[in-house]
Image (cartoon, grey):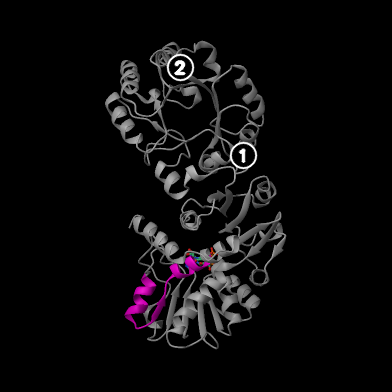
């Protein structure tokens, strides 16, 4: 179930937001502590309960538990008791206040514990202490300082013997808000829209429903995720969740912001993860923690995909073939191939590495240009090709030019890594940057009569290949492309 908290400041706004939220939510939580005037709070409870169309939880959170109520404790408890007298469906009472509230009518009591600093190690004791007060529902909400904190919340939910709401707050706790249904959690909270969150890390109801298909998640749902840092702006959850749904798979894909990769890999075995995408900064650092590495990925020395089968983790690199495929498609238009093509690659990071190895195998004559010369030298030694410093870029002369730096990426959309003079008619220009889809480099290239390949082609192909590796099913490429284009078009310009 999805519960939308209402954090309006007045009765009028509460009623109107409740009415809107009721279209999307299974339950509404009225955060009485957000109401500015104490007198208004009492009226608000009464009017809201009279006009409700969905079950309502009344909450009046004190400051000590992260709430906003600034009046006396006596007034706070009086309002909660009033909500019970008026027949609220649920009343949320903090553990330390639960002895001061009397259960009446059909109102159900949620006894809650909130910790805004951490996920303590004595969760079972907290749970048992709450149970002894005989609530109808237990609620334990903590703060995730590490992604593995979520696992302890999942363990708690797995062993809970009464209706329980439990998740972690904060960015690192988002997966527990998304996946609570898999582990038996009663509900999750989602904000009506951005800016109306009642706690850190809360997703919007739109994100939960449209990206993660929250209500389809159950104990049989298989887990996938993107390992990286940062990951909050990754488009991979949008693309993979849409594809899983399109193919009728009971899978969900979540962002995993990881700082300590070794600790995560050790702990993630406790969850039902079947595969991962891997992005900056873990594409290379993750290698020692894998059981097997695919031949091409091993040669590249970086992976972007993990398949978990029979408890074993195998790493692959789908960036490599995705880039090669994009270029081959472009060459096919003139019945040409990559063999013997002169290729200039700008950049020497992870993307450059994958692309350089792929093109070397296809018989290309490669030269790397990079700002940090040592990095260019290292990559050229590994691939067995030439290298130059960034300052020599104006001299480049090749059949194919590839940008693998972030120059030109949003928001620096007016920047380009090369002067227009190096762009010659007939040249193929490929930009790995995909936001925006048509970068300044590609615009310049078109004007100069070059053929262009955008980064979106590579992005879609690498995701499509991941999908195939995880599911053994043909990926819905057109849908993937539409989903990314649509998401990019909604980003701020
Ligand atoms: P990375 O490993 O961090 O490498 C970044 C590269 O860009 C390095 O060579 C770096 O040079 C260079 N660079 C960054 N800022 C620069 C600047 N201001 N001037 C000159 N050089 C600069 O990153 P990555 O994983 O290779 O990703 C690079 C780009 O490719 C990103 O824009 C990413 O979004 C894109 N990408 C796209 C796809 C796709 O599917 N389309 C896949 C992967 C990556 P130094 O060595 O001197 O720092």
- Bounds of the magenta segment: 440-462
> Residue under circle 2?
106
Q: Quadrant of residue 35?
A: top left
Q: Residue at x 34, y 78 (%)?
A: 446
Q: Quadrant of residue 368?
A: bottom right
> Residue under circle 1?
149
Q: Position of residue 52 (x, y in %)?
A: 34, 26
Query: In the structure shown, which secondary structural element does the residue marked by tag 2 occupy?
Result: loop
Q: Residue at x 61, y 58 (%)?
A: 282
Q: In this rendering, would 204 be left or right of 134?
A: left
Q: Residue at x 54, y 51 (%)?
A: 250
The label nearer to you, 1 versus 2, is 2
Q: In this rendering, would 361 be left or right of 427?
A: right
Q: Quadrant of residue 78?
A: top left
Q: Work out which quarter of the rendered image holds the C terminus and state it.
A: bottom left
Above/below status of 33 relative to 341: above
Q: Position of residue 380 (x, y in %)?
A: 61, 77
Above/below status of 158 relative to 493: above
Please indicate, yes or no, whether residue 348 appears anywhere in the rendered image. Answer: no
Of 111 and 147, nearer the camera is: 111
Mark 1 CB lies closer than 8 A to ligand 1: no
Q: In this rendering, would 126 be left or right of 483?
A: right
Check if residue 458 falls in the magenta segment.
yes
Query: In the structure shown, which secondary structural element does the residue marked by tag 1 occupy?
Result: helix
Number of marks in picture: 2
């Amino acid at each position: 179930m999805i519960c939308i908290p209402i954090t309006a400041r007045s009765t009028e706004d509460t009623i109107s937001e409740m009415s809107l939220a009721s279209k999307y939510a299974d339950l509404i939580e009225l955060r009485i502590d957000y109401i500015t005037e104490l007198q208004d709070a009492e009226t608000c409870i009464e009017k809201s309960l009279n006009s409700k169309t969905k079950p309502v939880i009344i909450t009046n959170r004190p400051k000590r538990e992260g709430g906003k109520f600034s009046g006396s404790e006596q007034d706070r408890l009086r309002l909660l008791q009033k909500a019970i007298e008026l027949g609220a469906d649920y009343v949320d009472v903090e553990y330390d206040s639960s002895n001061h509230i009397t259960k009446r009518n059909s109102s159900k009591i949620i006894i809650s514990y909130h910790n805004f600093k951490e996920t303590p190690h004595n969760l079972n004791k907290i749970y048992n202490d709450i149970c002894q007060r005989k609530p109808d529902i237990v609620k334990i909400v903590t703060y995730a300082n590490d992604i593995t904190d979520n696992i302890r919340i999942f363990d708690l939910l797995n062993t809970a013997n009464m209706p329980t709401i439990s998740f972690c707050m904060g960015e690192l706790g988002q997966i527990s808000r998304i996946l609570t249904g898999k582990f038996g959690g009663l509900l999750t909270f989602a904000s009506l829209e951005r800016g109306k969150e009642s706690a850190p890390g809360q997703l919007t109801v739109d994100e939960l429903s449209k990206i993660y298909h929250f209500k389809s998640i159950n104990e049989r749902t298989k887990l996938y995720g993107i390992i990286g840092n940062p990951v909050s702006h990754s488009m991979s959850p949008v693309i993979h969740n849409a594809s899983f749904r399109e193919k009728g798979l009971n899978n969900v894909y979540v962002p995993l912001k990881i700082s300590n990769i070794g600790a995560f890999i050790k702990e993630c075995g406790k969850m039902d993860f079947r595969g991962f995408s891997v992005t900056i900064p873990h594409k290379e650092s993750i290698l020692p923690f894998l059981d097997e590495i695919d031949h091409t990925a091993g040669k590249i020395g970086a992976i972007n995909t993990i398949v978990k089968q029979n408890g074993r983790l195998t790493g692959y690199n789908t960036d490599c073939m995705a880039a090669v495929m994009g270029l081959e498609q472009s060459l096919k238009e003139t019945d040409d191939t990559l063999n013997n093509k002169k290729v200039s690659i700008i950049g020497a990071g992870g993307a450059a590495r994958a692309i350089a190895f792929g093109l070397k195998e296809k018989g290309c004559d490669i030269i790397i240009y990079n700002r940090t010369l040592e990095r260019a030298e290292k990559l050229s030694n590994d691939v067995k090709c030439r290298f130059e410093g960034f300052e020599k870029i104006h001299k480049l002369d090749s059949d194919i030019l590839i940008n693998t730096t972030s120059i030109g990426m949003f928001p620096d959309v007016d920047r380009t890594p090369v002067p227009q003079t190096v762009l010659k008619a007939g040249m193929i220009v490929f930009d790995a940057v995909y936001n925006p889809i048509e970068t300044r480099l590609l615009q310049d290239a078109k004007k100069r009569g070059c053929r262009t390949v955008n980064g979106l082609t590579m992005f879609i192909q690498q995701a499509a290949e991941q999908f195939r590796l995880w599911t053994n099913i043909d990926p819905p490429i057109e849908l993937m492309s539409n989903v990314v284009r649509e998401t990019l078009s909604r980003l701020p310009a």
